[in-house]
Amino acid sequence: MIAALQSLHLTELGYLTLLAATPLTLAALGGLMCERSGVVNIALEGIMLTGAFVGYAAALATHNLWLGVLAAMLAGMAIAALHAALSISLLVDQIVSGTVINILAVGITGVYYRTYIQESSAVGPGILPTWHIPLLDRLPFLGQIFFQGQAITWAMLLLIVVVHVVLFHTVWGLRTRACGEHPLAADTVGINVYLVRYVNVIASGALAGLGGAYFSLQEIGNFLPNITGGRGFIALAAMIFGRWTPVGSFLASLLFAGADAVGARIQGFHNIPYQFLGMLPYVLTIVVVAGAMGRSIAPAAVGRPYKKQ
Amino acid sequence: MDLAIEWGQVHALLGENGAGKTTLMNVAYGLVRPDSGTILVDGNPVVIHGPQDAIRLGIGMVHQHFMLIPPLTVAENVILGHETVTAGGFVDQRAAEREVRDLSQRYGLEVDPRARIEGLPVGIQQRVEILKSLYRGARILILDEPTAVLTPQEVIGLFGILRNLAGEGSAIVFITHKLGEVMEVADTITVMRRGKVEATTRPTETNPAGLARLMVGRPVLLRVDKAPARPQRPVLELEKLVVHDDRHRVAVDGVALSVHAGEIVGIAGVEGNGQNELAEAIAGLRPDRGGRVLLDGQDVTRATTRHVLHGGLGFIPADRHRMGLVLEHSVSDNLVLSTFDRAPFAQWIIRRFEAVLEYAQRLIQQFDIRAESPSQPAGSLSGGNQQKVVAARELGRQPRALLASQPTRGLDVGSIEFIHRQIVDQRDAGLAVLLISSELDEILSLADRVAVMYRGRIVAILEGDAIDRERIGLLMAGAA
Amino acid sequence: MTWRRLFRPAAVALAAQPILSIVCGFLVAGLAVLASGADPIQAFSALFQGAFTNPRAFTETIIATLPYIFLGLAVALGFKAGLFNIGAEGQFYLGAVFGVFIGSSLHGVPAILHIPLALLAGMLGGFLWAAIPGIIKARTGAHEVIITIMLNYVAFQLTDFLINNRGPLADKTSSAPRTPFIQHAAQLPILIPGTRLHAGLFLALAAIPVVWFLLSRTTVGFQIRTVGMNATAARAAGISVGWTLVITMGISGALAGLAGADEVLGVSHFMPPSFSIGYGFDSIAVALLAKSNPWAILPAAFLFGAMRNGATFMQLQTQVSADLISIVQATVIIFIAAPAIIRWIFRLRHTPAAPVQLAKTDGGATI
């Protein structure tokens, strides 16, 4: 048993889990800002994909990874703005709008990948450097997991705190939550529900775009079609499982990413096929949504377009 | 429309549903635009475009349906939109809680600022609504049917608070339909009826009977000629029925009633006293929490709607757009909405359109439904004809009992007369009719026996000469 | 339906919106191609060639159309009841798995029995996979969108498990991960020798009138449509809304499963682990374009099939990626779902038809 645990190389496992959880958490943070204000966002996958692509393309063109990260966030915001315009102003069903974004993202990244990246013979911009916090990174176990890492993962850890504080301790967060629970009540006290929702949706684009940048600029330093591989939907599951809170989403992401990583290791010891561990996030989400929990903890007015009286 | 509210007074606005009280106050709060007239605050004419203007003028409104956000705390709800902030846009939780505590103590509205709305009893939630207005500096406070959701003890508490506020110089407008309360708490009373002010008086100058007369007025119309009823065996029986509403509170509190073949029993009462829940429970749309419903001797308490409908109940729901009709379906499809899968309208799962059409044409003629063609969508008909479709559908099935809820709401006089005629004719043919209506005139002209419903209970069942307009008005308003 | 009625203004206006949406879709895609430095005319003509004029292109287009017909019908049926069946992809997979299983494991059964059995198995697989979200929705009210999306991924993992390497359905004799080939008797016969066009064509063409008949002539269809229009009134008239939702999802899933079995039995004759290229999501676009009308599914599916087929050729010929058709699809959906945009662009008169209510998220979506 001990040998089995040891061979799991816990520290390395922890580090990899944290890395894998980075895009999930970032997208989930974006998703929850959006949904807390009352707009369903199943387009996280598409936004991440767009972010990954634009980030890489920009980094390639300018040979500057940081500009790439910035570009990824801006691209995420732009495409999220489309989702906002469709669902908030044009009153398109939010699920349809989200689906459209996903399809569009595949299309755009696919077409431009071909012309700008695949054919390009330019040397890649590399990946984000790994930073170390001196002294702290010598700590056993924790040190190697939390105190060394690349920028996007650091950003994620910071953003968990930021989103939490914004959502639960600022005026903006209070108004956002009001719009997601009871937009009519918010309207009667003078809050501009449309504006709040627009801003939150676009902010979610920035976060998800950053999550997409993880794939192309932090993980592999390249872009491949469908690089996000459904992670946007796992992020959605993490958000739900984490009860629409930043910390909860983070923990859920760790759980899902960890199950994946552990599964790959365990393969050698037990015969639980790794695919069943891969199903875990999805099955858990179904259980959460189907159970009474799912219905009572989502923001009450999510999914319904708001029309000013 | 003339109304004057004075500082330091509790002014009650009394009237039945639809009298116009809420609409009038919605104008004051900026939720509705007036077509003509002026609003003066402290003698100065003002224009109110929306709630923000009203709030700035010091007008606050406590709605009948609270505008509170359940998962947020009391303090958060109170300050929403006018948040107390520290530098950087952070909500100053402690300052907010302190202010809420101060306000609540000053006015005697005890609340815990940190409690979440969703866990609070309704009476306390109402205090939060009031605090919201006070926090924004309201000196004129409008309360719309505030006691509708309170227990008698909570009502006493509320009156104390209102008197406090008035004592401090605020002006209170209290919209209600309940006579007893008005006599107890108001300094001035204005009675409204059908959009007009009937009278303005003081409790010292009037009495409940007089107020009731002003509220329900003289009968204007629609006396249906009907022969005296000849009731036979009971068809629909309610035994100690208990039903909960959507918030899990008791809406129907032990109702016992029996409706015989060949009679019309009318349930009079102001809307919101449990009538909707009662109707839905009988129709199987709402689970009963106690008691029994018997249809022709059969216990249908736990039966499905389908079972009840096919067991001999006709149901005309109160909201014909939401529950009565499918507006996109054709008239003929609506006419077979509950029978489309039975012979002769279907053979196994194949629908027989000729049979449906023939049936529809017959009903259209019988009920004088003005439609260009039976395949017209029901949504394109006028309100009166739409309701005729619902009535035709239910009566056409030849039920043994009919449950009709607000059957002529919003209809023109001609349609009203027609439907009333139909109901009486069917009664004479042996139908048992349970009529629920908030239109007292309708009850008075149709019902053979009148039951008055107040706060989920039948407070009286009157028949014959005992059916007296004023008496019923008093019972409806909770007095007498 | 007389020809004169076809050209009446109302009918024209009704068809105008989808057609204009498609035109705009191609325009936007053309702009996108231009922005990538390639020649849109060249790209579109390659697309056309690949879809229609190349040798055997036409039959390949038809083959690509078939799954879209079944899946489009499945999604459209869901819409009629107010349900958003995004799980068509997963149900497609399950149908293929069940179909392949029956197709490969029964020996010595004559074709006349084997084919229907395998197809029915496929329908069963899809039915079961769709019934799960249906039952959950009926019992708890939980929204079917998130559950069906999750089940899609479960389906992918499940089939990967079944087919990959040592999985129970894997062909042990093959080096590449896949199921064994189906028995010869289970294969759908080829209609035109020298092509891959298989008898699934008849099935697909038959499915359309069957679904139309179900919706417009049967009591079940009436129930489904009524619940989709006004579930409250349906309930008050005695219709069991929960049951209706389950049945609708079930039939929808069965259609999607049939698509899967049809593909396996007719085209590939085995199942590889990465089976579909997003047919499920595309079929949402098909259903939207056809406005959930079974007859209109045929041209809509044909359009998508043609685009899908032509795109591979276009990718070979020009530098433009096959994903271009996704841009067309997305734009078409935007214009269909937000008719205000088209009206504003073309100054169309406002047709007072029912607003585009595709799926009613009654009570708020729990996502």
Image (cartoon, coloured by chain):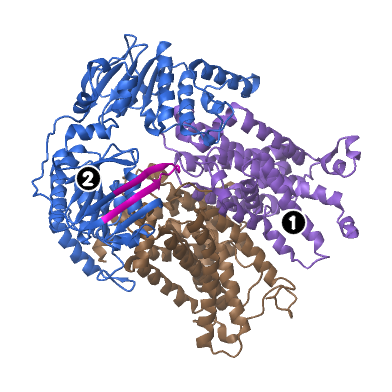
Chain colours: A purple, B blue, C brown
Residue B173 included in the magenta stretch of the image:
no
- Label 1 Cα neighbours within 10 Å, binned few <14 / some 14-19 / many ≥20: many
- Residue linked to disc 1: A260
Q: Is residue B120 above or below residue C305?
A: above
Residue type pointed to by label 2 = Gly
Q: Which residue is mark 2?
A: B266
Q: Chain of mark 1?
A: A
Q: Is residue C49 visible?
A: no
Residue B237 among those drawn in magenta: yes
Compared to A92, does C157 lie above or below? below
Dot in front, 2 or 1: 2
**Amino acid at circle 1:** Asp
Secondary element type, mark 1: helix
Where residue C17 appears, as percent x and y from the top left, is 38, 52
Image quarter for residue C280? bottom right
Corner quadrant of residue A211: top right
| Front residue of B372 and C57 | B372
Closer to the camera in the image, C45 or A174: A174
Distance from disc 2 to disc 1, alpha carbons, whole Å, reads 67 Å
Q: Look at the image and give the residue range highlighted in magenta.
A: B236-256
Residue under the point 77% across and 59% down: A263
* Residue shown at 61% from the left, 46% from the top: A47
